[in-house]
Amino acid sequence: MSTKKKSLRSQDPNLAREKKTYENPLPSREFILEVLRTEGVPISEARLCAMFDVAPEEMDAFSRRLQAMERDGQAMRNRRGDICLVEKLDVIKGRVQGHPDGFGFLIPDGGGPDLFLNPKEMHKVFHGDRVIGREIGIDRRGRHEGAIVEVLEHTRKTIVGRLFAERGLLFVVAEEKRISQDILIAPEDINGAKPGQVVVAEIVMQPSKHAEPMGRVIEILGNYADPGMEIEIALRKHDLPHVFSPAVEKLAEKFPKGVRKTDLKDREDIRHLPLVTIDGETAKDFDDAVYCEQQGKGFRLVVAIADVSHYVKDKDALDKEALERGNSVYFPRRVIPMLPEELSNGLCSLKPEVDRLCMVCDMDISGKGNIKKYRFYPAVMHSHARLTYTKVAAMLYEHDQAAIDEHIALLPHLQNLDKVFRALLDSRQLRGAIDFDSVETQMFFNEQGKIEKILPVTRNDAHRLIEECMLAANVCSANFLLEKKQKVLFRIHEGPTPEKLDNLRAFLRQVGLELGGNEHPTPKDYMKLREGIDKRPDAALLQSILLRSMQQAVYSPDNVGHFGLAYEAYTHFTSPIRRYPDLLVHRALKAVLKEGEYSPGSWEEIGVHCSQTERRADDATRDVEAWLKCFYMQDKVGEIYRGIISAVTSFGVFVILDGIFTEGLIHISELGSDYFHFDAARHELAGERTGQRFRLGDRVVIRVVRVDMETSKIDFVLAPTQPVAIESDTPMMPAFVPPVVEKAKKKTREKGKRKS
C-alpha cells in the first residue's frame, strides 16, 4: 500500500498564522529561509516555486514575498538570479553614513568595524540609506574598505536645499552636507521656483552607479535670508514632524477647556496645598509644581506632574504622533511641541488659579536629604502661583522686599523648599554625583528676527532647587517600578568605556593628575578629581576632558544605573508634556497602582527610537543656532576677539569667542609656518620645528576672516597678542599662553643670538 508524500508546503510551522492573515496562505518567510538553509546552495525562483507547489495564480504573490525578503536583507539574488541567504554570504547589512567630503561609511547593524565607502561607492546612495555591503580590503590608511552590493532601502524621499542654475542645468544642492550629490531638476518640474530659493524636492529617481538622482520641486520655502528660514530648513533636513495630522487635530478639538467632575474619580484632592510652578520667564508649558512643609527635623516634599496620560490614550492618534515626535523641540523663538497646543499649553499645563489633573510623588525626606518613604497617586491640584527662577531667587536669596510682598503668603513654603533643597544637595555630594560647570546662552532678537546679542544664562539656586526636587521624584519612580517588577524605560548613563578610560588616564598622567578607582572609577572618583583642579589655569581643559570621557545618556529597559547622577536606577517622570518616555512612566505607574501591568510594545525599540529623536532634536537646534550665529557674525569680518580652544582636530582648532559664544575654525594652515601634528591623546596640535602647541582649553586671540552662510561655518586666523581695539561690548580677557609656547619662543630667540 503506497502513502502519498506529504507536501513541503504543508510542513510550514507557521501555516496556521499565515491562514489567519491570508485567504490563500503562501509559505512563510521563516520557512523559506529554513528551506534555503537546508538546501545549502542558491536556488532559482522557478525551483523554489516547484518545491513549494506554487500554483500559476500564486506566482505574482510569491515573487512579491521574495522581493520583500530582499528589501529586508534576508535574501538576495546572485548574478544568475538565484535566491541566496544573506547570512551565508560574506556580506554586511547596515546603514550608510555620508561625509561632506564625498566619502562615507557603512555602519554594520550587528556592530564591528565600519566599512569605508569611497566617493565612487557613495555615488550610488544617499546618507541614511540601508544597504548590503562587502569588505573588499584595507585601504592605504588602514581602514576596512567596502563596496555596496545591494541597496535595501532608499530612506530619502524628499530633500531640502537651494535651487541653482548653471549652463542650462537646474539642480538642488542639499542642506544636509552629508548628501554630496546634486539633485537634477527638469525645467518642467521646478514648480515656479527661482534659482537661489530654498525648496523641497521630491526624489523621483534615486542615485545609482551610472545616473545622478533626479527630483521635482514640491514646496518653495522662500529666500535663504528670510526670517525663520533657518528653522524651516532644519525641520525638513532632520525629518522633524512639525504638522499635526487631521486625526490628531480632530482629537485635540474634542478635549474640554478644563477639569470636569467626572475626571475626579479615584483621585486625591490636593487643591488646598499651596503648590506653585517655578520656570523660566518664557515658559508656556508647565509640567511640574512643588510644595514643601517641615515635619519635625525632616520634610514632606510634594512634586505634582501634569497627568498627560489621562488625555493621551495608549495607541490612539495622539499617542502615535507623540511617539513619532519623541519630544518637543525648542528652537530660538519657536517650539515644535510633542502634543497639540490644546494640551501642551492648555489642559495639561499647570497654570495658576485653575484646577488640573496630576500624578503626584509625595515624599518624606530626612533632614540629611535621604528619602525615607514615598507614594504615588493620581490627584487634582490647583497651582497657587506661576513663579519664575528670577523671582524666587529675589525672594529667597536677594531678600527683595517688593518680590516678597507680592507673594508673602507663599514665602514660608518657599523657605521650606530651600531647606529641603539644601538637604538634598548635601545628599548629592555624599553620593558623589558629578557636577560640572557649564555655560548656557540665550539669544536676543531684533524685530527682523536676527540676533541682536548673545548672553550667558545665569543659573541661580532657584534653578538648582527645582532640579533637586525633580531628581528626587525621578529616582522614586525608578525605585517604585523596579520594586514592582514593572518594565519601563530607564534613563541610563554608563561610565567610561575601557578605551576612553585609557585615553583619559594617559592624558592625566601627562599633567600630573590621577583618577582613582582603577579599572572601574566611580562618580566620587570623578568628583574628587574635579574638586582638585578648580584653581588650576587649565581647569577648563581638564573639565572638558573629563566630560568627553563619559558616554551619552540614553533610554533603555535594561537598568544599568545613571553614572553621572550616581543613582542605581533613574527614570524620567517629571516632563510628560514634552518627553514621550515620561508619559510611558506615568502609564506604568498607574498600571502598578491598579495592580496591573503595562506594555506599549517593544520597550527596546521604543527606547532606541526615543534616544534617536532626542539626538535629532539636538542636531536640529545646533544647526539653527549655528546659522543664526553666522548671520550675526556677517558684519564682524576683520574684527579681533579673544577666545578659548573648544576642540582640536587633525585639520585645525575650533575656538569659542568670549562674550558672544560663537565658534569658528582656525585651519591648521593658519597656525604658523610649521608642520603641525595632531595628538588625540593630548588633545593638541604640536609644531614639528617650533614645538608650538595648541591645546584644548588654551586661550588665543583671533581675527574673523570669513563667514559662510551656506555651510554655517566661520573661519578665524591667529591675531597678534599685543593690545588691540576690539569693537565689542565685551572686554578682552587675558589670553592664556601655554608655557610650552613661551619655551619654544625662548629657544628660537637663543638660536638667533648664537647665529648672530
Image: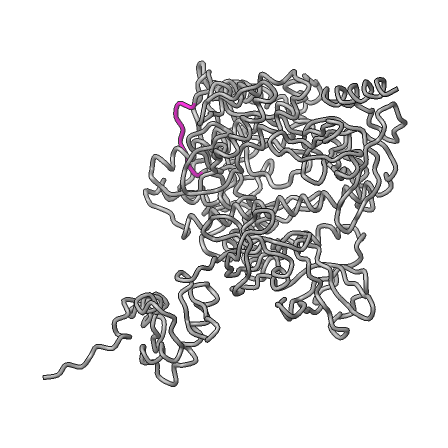
Instruction: Choose between 305 and 30: the one closer to the eye.
Output: 30
Q: Position of residue 625 (x, y in %)?
A: 72, 43
Residue extending farthest bottom? 56
- Residue 573 vs residue 119: left or right? left
* Count of numbered tags: 0
**Looking at the picture, how far across and down is residue 209, in whole percent?**
62, 68
- Establish if 637 lies above or below 527: below
On the image, the x and y values in percent for residue 78 come to 46, 71
Q: Is residue 372 magenta?
A: yes
- The answer to whether any part of residue 416 appears in the image is no
Left or right side of 80 for 539: right
Query: Magenta part of the protein: which range?
Result: 371-378
**Residue 727 makes an appearance in the image:** yes
Quarter holding the C terminus is top right
* Magenta stretch: helix, strand or loop mostly: strand
Query: In this rendering, would 729 be left or right of 80?
Result: right
Q: Is residue 23 left or right of residue 208?
A: left
